[in-house]
Amino acid sequence: MPHLVANFLRSSTGNISQIKNAARSRTASRNASCESSRNNSISGSPYDSDTEDTSKTHDLLEAVKKHHKLSLHFGRSSSSPVRELNPASCSVAAVDWNIESPPIIFHGTREDSTGAIVSGQIFLDIKEDTVDIDSFKANLSIHTTYKRPCQGHCAECQNQVTELQAWVFLDHTTKLHRGRHAFPFSALLSGELPASTNTPLVSIAYEFKAVAQVSRHATGTSTPIQLKFDRTLLVKRSVPEPLFPHHSVRVFPPTNIKASADYASVVHPTSTNKLTLKLDGLMTHNEKVKTVDLWKLKKVTWKLEETIKTVAPACDKHAASASTIGEVRGTVRNEVRVIGEKQLHEGWKSDYSGHDGSVDMELDYSINQARNSAGELKYACDTKTADSTEVSHSLLLELIVSKEYAPEGRAHQATPTGTGRILRMHFAVVLTEHSGLGVSWDNEAPPIYEDVPPSPPAYPLESPIDYQDLEPLYARPSSIDASADDVPSP
């Protein structure tokens, strides 16, 4: 710090001296060139303002001094007895981790999922010969953030943290030697917990936090130092696909139009999903006038809608002014957004040759993979929590049909009547993540003999028994073949 102050003062003094010399040279040249004019005039000379110019130069010098004035902010020392540091900023110790379990996926719905196991190791890297660690703790919690809270500028209404599990690795001062020290941890997340979610109304994140407190004797400071380690775990849910597609039938009175749809009720974000649609009852026969009324399909629009519902709870301070919703006091928040849509003007097959006209089509629908300004995808998988937060999806179909009439048996000569209808259909679908090759932890089979890699058994390098030190064993003599004096060979 002293050499910085000296550099600032040197630069300031040098600049001020240059400005002074420039001002003196301009004043001297002006006085020399106008000396005769000053002697011949008593008043009214334009050079009578030299005094004013000098004062302006003085003001300029003062401004330069203020501009180069050293302005350093010396904050007050914190009154907290513990200093918080990033693990990478400490020179005596560092915190790191390693997750050993597979990706965290809840297999099945909230009602039938057995959860997922999280296991790994957290490390304390000691960089000195010996370092005293006062304590070392960690916890795993769910952080729910309400982006439209009950009270706009209340941090307690906006954030709710629920601790799932805590670990105490060191609860008293422990001397650790140089090297890496591993502390294993594991947790079983219940299948009823929600998956990680980020929506315009609410976000759910799983946060792992660890705090190691380094003794002040190890750092040579007046207060202990806390090393904080924060990570976010991505938790997904995968709902199994049904064996057969879902079949749905819709009727649109007062017409005879009937729509039959076959579709997969479980869809994936990155997959292309199919829906098969058939329309019947598109012809009406007028026997008296020998004509037929036709309904012809003109346009098909599909939309994949995402509905977000939540209750933004009120904190203890604002609970009195909030309304009661079930068992929670707060405000209801709803939002519907479109995460995929497309319009079709062709791609179906119409048949009006029989007694009843029909249209057959197969359409593909998928989710828009566009991202917002923060780089986040604009969709969320189906989620339902115990605190009234729910994300659901539905496929909306809009069919525009136009009524035409034609002579009996000549449907190709149909004439528009100017009458049309919009046929709307909603199909509930479940948006879920791919399960991949993983299975639930309780369905994992232990390794079998064929899965163990071949390896020879381990033998000791030296014999554990010295046979030369053993006493010789003699066979017991037989009373018939040998006498008592005979000694058999070993």
Image (cartoon, grey):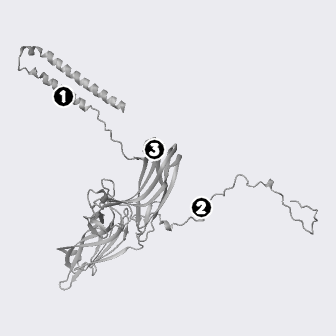
Give the quarter of the image for residue 42: top left
Q: Which kind of residue does numbered mark 2 sit on?
A: Val
| Mark drawn on residue 216 | 3
- On the question of residue 101 being in view, the answer is no
Q: Within 10 Å of the Cα at label 3, are there few (<14), some (14-19), or many (20+) other Cα atoms?
A: some
Please name the residue that numbered disc 2 is placed on: 452
Q: Position of residue 161 (x, y in %)?
A: 37, 59
Vertical placement of residue 5 versus 116, above or below: above
Q: Position of residue 1 (x, y in %)?
A: 36, 33
Question: Marks 3/1: CA distance?
Answer: 52 Å
Q: Which kind of residue does numbered mark 1 sit on?
A: Asp
Vertical placement of residue 478 versus 250, above or below: above
Vertical placement of residue 367 versus 279, above or below: above
Is disc 3 placed on a helix, strand or loop?
Answer: helix
Q: Within 10 Å of the Cα at label 2, are there few (<14), some (14-19), or many (20+) other Cα atoms?
A: few
Question: Residue farthest to the bottom?
Answer: 288
Instruction: Decide if residue 239 is on the left or right side of residue 176.
Output: left
Give the quarter of the image for residue 329: bottom left
Viewer-nearest of labels 3 and 1? Answer: 3
Instruction: Decide if residue 394 is on the left or right side of residue 420.
Output: right
Viewer-nearest of labels 1 and 2? Answer: 1
Q: Position of residue 30 (x, y in %)?
A: 15, 19
Please name the residue that numbered disc 1 is placed on: 59
For the residues bearing labels 3 and 1, Cβ distance under 8 angstroms: no
Is disc 2 placed on a helix, strand or loop?
Answer: loop
> Which quarter of the figure is the C terminus placed in?
bottom right
Residue sitting at x 80%, y 56%: 470
